[in-house]
Image (cartoon, rainbow, N blue to C red):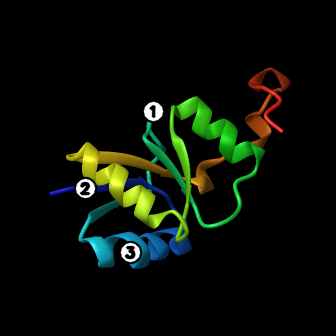
Amino acid sequence: MTVVRLYSRQVSLVRECNRSVVTPFGVVLEVNSAAPPFDASFVLTTAKPGREVVVMAQRLGATVVVLPEAAYFLYSQVHSAGGVVIAVGADHVRSSSLQPQDGALF
């Protein structure tokens, strides 16, 4: 059984995960509204990722996944990893915490 533990408070992101990943592929989704962990496999978003999202993903050592476009990619990565996969919602971005030394990604 494959489990995606999603750290997000954004209802639209949870709904999209259910619609594009859970329903078609049978993945178990555990939603946690607490603060995100210090590392994760994926940062999930439903919009175009901005600089803040990319920097947060880099800090977490994660890959940015835009749903529903990358639902098959997410499922293939989750399925091959097996067990529990940690995903963080893009709503955890703290744009005020970015500093110039975080990198000029764009």
Q: Which residue, given by chain and number where applicable, does mark 3 sit on?
A: 18
Give the mark nearest the N terminus, 3 or 2.
Answer: 2
Categorize mark 1 by other alpha carbons within 10 Å: few (<14), some (14-19), many (20+). Answer: some
Total numbered labels: 3
Residue 39 disc label? 1
- The answer to which image quadrant residue 23 occupies is bottom left
The amino acid pointed to by label 1 is: Asp
Name which residue lies at 25% across and 55% down: 3
Residue at the spot 67% in from the left edge and 65% down from the top edge? 47
> Please, what secondary structure does the residue beneath circle 2 have?
strand
Residue 15, horizontal then vertical, whole percent: 46, 76
Side of 23 where 38 appears, left or right: right
Q: Nearer the viewer, residue 73 or 37?
A: 73
Q: Are marks 1 and 3 in contact (CB under 8 Å)?
A: no
In depth, the one of 47 and 34 nearer the eye is: 47
Residue at 52 percent of width and 73 percent of height: 11
The N terminus, quarter of image: bottom left
Place of residue 24 in the rendered image (x, y in percent of width and height, measured from the top left): 31, 77
Image quarter of residue 69? bottom right
Residue kind at label 3, given as amino acid type:
Asn
Q: Nearer the viewer, residue 83 or 88?
A: 83
**Quick check: 67 above or below 104?**
below
Q: Can residue 62 be seen in this snapshot?
A: yes
Q: Residue at x 61, y 56 (%)?
A: 91
* Contact? badges 3 and 2 (CB < 8 Å): no
Give the image quarter of residue 21: bottom left
Work out how far the residue at label 3 is from the one at label 2, CA to CA, in angstroms: 12 Å
Query: Marks 1 and 3, how far apart in space?
Result: 23 Å
Task: Give above or below for 42 relative to 69.
Answer: above
Query: Which numbered disc covers residue 3?
Result: 2
- The answer to whether residue 94 is visible is no
